[in-house]
Amino acid sequence: MIRVGNEAFIAQSNAFFFHGGSEGLYASKVVDSSSSSSSPDKPVKGKSFIRFETVTFVRPRESARTKNEMQQKTGLVEAIILEIKDRERIGGSFLKLDTICCTKNLSRDGYCNSGEVIIHKNLDNPDWPKRVQTFFEGTNGEAQMSPDDIVYIDRTGMYYLYFMFCDPELKGTLVKGRRVWKNPDGYLPGKMAPLMTFFGIMSLAYLVLGLAWFLRFVQFWKNIMQLHYYITVVIALGMCEMAFWYFANFNSTGSRPMGVTLWAASFTFFKKTLSRLLLLVISMGYGVVKPTLGGLTSRVVLLGLVYLVASEALELFENLGNINDFSGKAKLFLVLPVNVLDSCFILWIFSSLSKTLEKLQMRRNMATLELYRKFTNSLAVCVLLSIAWIGFELYFNATDPLNELWQFAWIIPAFWNFLSYTLLMVICALWAPSRNPTSYAYSEEMGEDFDEEGVALLAPG
């Protein structure tokens, strides 16, 4: 469901429009002649549709006062629904005109009806694009769409909804209310439906990893290091994150379960933050080649807190707002800080790893050195894969600005979750509790203490 409250129309050419939403919709599983008579409260099972609930248009008082109270139709607003492939069929482009609304000359020539949006019908699908008309009555300032105005979808595609009017006297009109988009199997947007299956699979994967780690943890509990507790927390957060996203499912109701969604988003930004901090402290040698982080502790905590706030803002914006398969530009202002902080983490992690490897080599601690080399190689592969995937994601978005490839878009967020899980498995394998952890655990017998790392990142001055 998408809700709006008193949003204004935008002028374009000789029309005024408001983007009412866009989503990937699958074709109805069952199409029959009785579908149009179905109650809006009890939609036919297997149907894919767009329904208008409490959608109301509010025109300026000045416009209403100029009308005759006895007139039945004193203003027209149209809801235009089209598949993105038919976007050129809206307006006079087929007549090589820039106009969107029908003029008197075009009406006289029989191309359209004056005062309406020009629609060039698709010969292969003559019922599309769709238009649903709503009229103002007399001097009424509001006009509400009928909840019986249901548009059923018979072809799989990315669908756009626009509210439009052509009457200049309606300038300043506002739109508010709720629209419902439904796929054959439920209310999940087309791009999100495959993610539910993915979250279910990842929940089981984290459960298996957590069980294996727990058994190892219990088996060698006498040799547990502080680092093992941090790894346990990250595994638990990942398990909860995937499980809550799986159960934060509004497929049957169309409304997000706010409590479960909030918990899912919370587990996500906590896990992302702690995962990055875990990589950083491991790279610094914490619990393995040094007992504490010393003077760097405050800087590590500061970076973690800043990242927590930035990722929290992004997650809440993405998951607690309107559900729409078309990303808004406002998201960019929240993505940018998270990307910058991710870059800070990467730089600091590899800088710390370089220093740790150098010191281990100087001390000829070959067992720990080999461990860190394996970790460095794994991390480098993950970073290279991340860079390659970011390039693919940029290419994907640049070549598909209108989300025509929406059926494959779920792979992009799924990749990051899978990569994070893979790296966590590597850490669990390298730092698994064992009977003899002295091969990588910190020992004062290693000799002189390490110097504080001279990492300038985030350092004042």
Image (cartoon, rainbow, N blue to C red):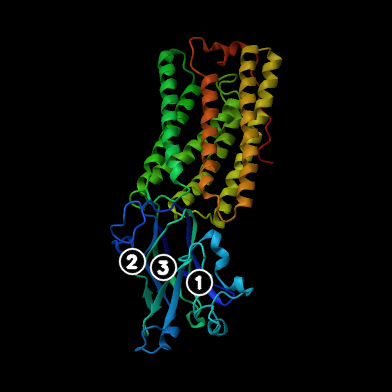
176, 435: nearer the viewer? 176
Callout 1: SS: loop
Name the mark nearer the viewer: 1 or 2: 2
Type of amino acid under label 1: Phe
The part of the image, by quadrant, that contains residue 50 is bottom left
Q: Is residue 347 left or right of residue 32?
A: right
Picture quarter with the N terminus: bottom left
Give coordinates of residue 411: x percent, y percent. 53, 41
Give coordinates of residue 152: x percent, y percent. 39, 60
Callout 2: SS: loop
Crowding near pointer 2: few (<14 within 10 Å), some, many (20+)?
some
Disc 1 or 3, which lies upstream in sequence?
Answer: 1
Disc 2 or 3, which lies upstream in sequence?
Answer: 2
Residue to which mark 2 is pinned = 147
Name the mark nearer the viewer: 2 or 3: 2
131, 109: nearer the viewer? 109
Type of amino acid under label 3: Lys
In this view, 52 is above or below 30: below
Residue to which mark 3 is pinned = 176
Type of amino acid under label 2: Pro
Callout 3: SS: strand
